[in-house]
Image: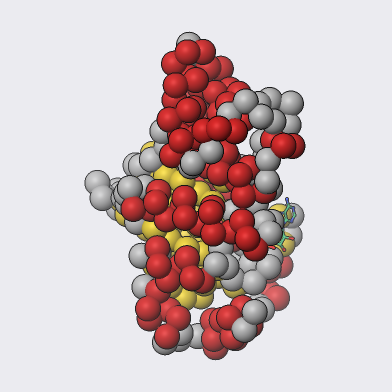
Amino acid sequence: MNVNRRMKHPGSKGVDSVSAPTEREMIRIVGLSKWFGRFQVLNDINLVVNRGERIVICGPSGSGKSTLIRCINRLEEHERGQIFVDGTEVKSSSKDREIDAIRSEIGMVFQHFNLFPHLSIKENCTLALTVVRGMSKAEADAVAMRYLERVRIPEQADKYPGQLSGGQKQRVAIARALCMNPKIMLFDEPTSALDPEMIKEVLDVMAELAESGMTMIVVSHEMGFARMVADRVIFMDGGEIIEQNDPETFFNKPQSDRTKLFLSQILKH
Ligand SMILES: Nc1ncnc2c1ncn2[C@@H]1O[C@H](COP(=O)(O)OP(=O)(O)OP(=O)(O)O)[C@@H](O)[C@H]1O
Ligand SMILES: [Mg+2]
């Protein structure tokens, strides 16, 4: 790890200009750097994700994977560089309504589900539809049921999160995100808190979503999923993208020693 890099202060200069994102690009990240205080968590990240592309990001704990995807929907602010989502720049000066507009295009699924425990499964799905989108209850219920069917748990609609298994809760979280009709889905280790027997049911739902053409960025160490579903696998370490490739090349011919070491560690489990 380069200690000097990590101690650098954020400068005031950003990237001066970049060519405009093209029609086929859903996300464009240029020269993205971010600090937590004096600690540089992301260093000069450059990444273009095309419409319908499926990206899997892996890398050791603390390498900046969550921070990177959280910057895309402004759950974290970046200090340097540019992020475009469907042609709109995510800036520190963006107004609340601009951020809301960007967020409305992005669904996010977290490791720990983040469901409201006091709301039923259906209410968890309809809350944003009625409050943010202004839908009637009947309309929102219909949308919620459509997506609960899609993740194969319509029969759980009237239960509460505490009554569901981890795999079911994560499928609710996916359904809830899909209710908002996003153009992009971001997943942050969606299966790492699950018991092994529940991982497959969640990955199956995600694979179906991928087949439907959704643009997806998935932080995951499920390498079987990456091999099957990803168009591209990205390896991050120390706040940088170290290597990226199609799954076949990534797994069979990793280039960097750091990638090789990482793969040897996770694939032996
Ligand atoms: N809010 C914060 N304030 C200060 N440091 C933070 C904050 N969030 C994350 N960090 C630090 O930034 C680094 C990257 O964190 P991040 O959560 O992005 O890593 P990660 O690759 O997702 O790791 P993991 O695999 O453990 O989830 C870590 O060293 C972490 O401690
Ligand atoms: Mg993380």
Pick the residue in front: 199 or 52.
199
Where is residue 181? Give x, y as percent: 41, 33
Seen from the viewer's position, the closer of residues 111 and 49 is: 111
Quadrant of the snapshot with the N terminus = bottom right
Residue 191, given in percent of the width and then of the height, sits at 61, 57
Q: Is residue 161 visible?
A: yes
Which quarter of the figure is the C terminus placed in?
bottom right
Above-or-below relation of 14 to 153: below
The answer to which of 242 and 192 lies nearer the viewer is: 192
Residue at 62% of width from left, 49% of height from top? 167
Residue placed at 34% from the left, 53% from the top?
A: 211
> Residue at image x 56%, y 63%?
220
> Which residue is farthest left?
23
| Residue 127 coordinates in the image, percent (x, y) | 58, 22
70 sits left or right of 164 in the view: left
Q: Which coloring applies here?
A: secondary structure
Apparent side of residue 239 relative to residue 57 in the rendered image (left or right): right
Is 128 situated above or below 189?
above
| Residue 150 pos. (x, y %) | 43, 39
Residue at figure coordinates x 47%, y 55% from the top left: 204
Q: How many marks?
A: 0
Residue 231 figure quarter: bottom left
Note whether residue 102 is visible: no
Q: Which quadrant of the figure has residue 105?
A: top left
Q: Is residue 229 left or right of residue 153?
A: left
